[in-house]
Image: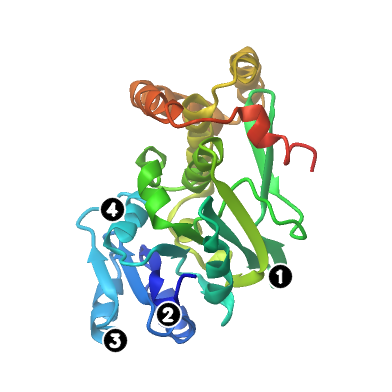
Amino acid sequence: MLLLMDISIVIPNYNGKDLLEKNLPQVIKTAGETQIVVVDDASTDPSAEFIKKNFPNITLIEKVTNSGFATSVNLGVKAATGDVIFLLNTDAVPDPNCIKQVLTHFREAEVFAVGCLDKSIEQKKVVERGRGVGKIDRGFLIHGRGDTDKTNTLWASGGSSAYRKSLWEKLGGMDELYNPFYWEDIDLSYRALKSGYKIVFDRKAVVEHKHEEGSINKHYKPQEIKQLAYRNQFIFVWKNISSKAYLIQHFFWLPYHLVKTLTRGDMAFTFGFLLALVQWKKIMKQSQQVLKTFIKTDEVVLAPFSHE
């Protein structure tokens, strides 16, 4: 059984000084002597200075240039000493028993990740999230929130979940093609599932997550967020989907999607497509690498989630 000291908490940060000041003391109280790694993504606010002054025992990594979530997390995992990595956003706080709860699942060697019950504070209401489902529809992976009374999940959320470090390294960590944000956790989880590993959802492992306070909504315009989400949706399909039927479906429906979104003035979809297209060579190179590790088909991986 893994001990408490075998886990490291990794917190990526960008201009989150106020959130760190508010939430970090609670995280430390919950974590005890657990190693905490904060990766500062070249913040323009005094986040790094705040950590140095108030929490000298925290492992602080200061990036010189802002690059995005995947790069920050990969650097944090590299610096972590634990056998298990707990990823936590600056706007999230785990409940007192959360860390001990997730560790129980790593007794099983094939478990790659554990997703937590994310009590998301949205417009002053609590929405239970954390379990993901999805299916291929008209050529894209359409993902969404699944019922939280089940123990399987299509992905472990990068803002509140735990990962086995040895398998993280074997899978190559988060793909930095998705920088600055979105889809990197779905991509990593999907690669793990297609490589034969397990991802567990545990509703007893609770994290309070105040999404609306996070850095994405503060520092990016809605149109920019939408455009990047579309780009990364393309990257995911081109990189990870190996089913001939699904790929035929994707390219068959692509002209329809482009015409329909242009007709209704949704330029974000077109721009997202073009941004993905310019990275085609890099995506294909990544695809050739990950295909070597896959032992399950897309149909088998998606079957448990497609009808929810």
Quarter-wise, where is residue 179 in the image? top left
Query: What element does badge 1 sit on?
Result: strand
Residue 126, disc: 1
The Cα atoms of the two marked residues, 3 and 1, are separated by: 31 Å
The numbered mark, 4 or 3, whose residue comes first in the sequence reads 3
Quarter-wise, where is residue 226 in the image? top right
The Cα atoms of the two marked residues, 2 and 3, are separated by: 10 Å
> How busy is the neighbourhood of tag 3: few (under 14 within 10 Å), some, or many (20 plus)?
few
Q: Position of residue 280 (x, y in %)?
A: 39, 22
Q: If the image is split into quadrants, where does the C terminus sit?
A: top right
Residue 54, disc: 3
Instruction: Look at label 3 and name its amino acid.
Output: Asn
Colour style of the rendered protein structure: rainbow
Residue 66, disc: 4
Question: Which residue position holds label 2?
Answer: 24
Quarter-wise, where is residue 126 in the image? bottom right
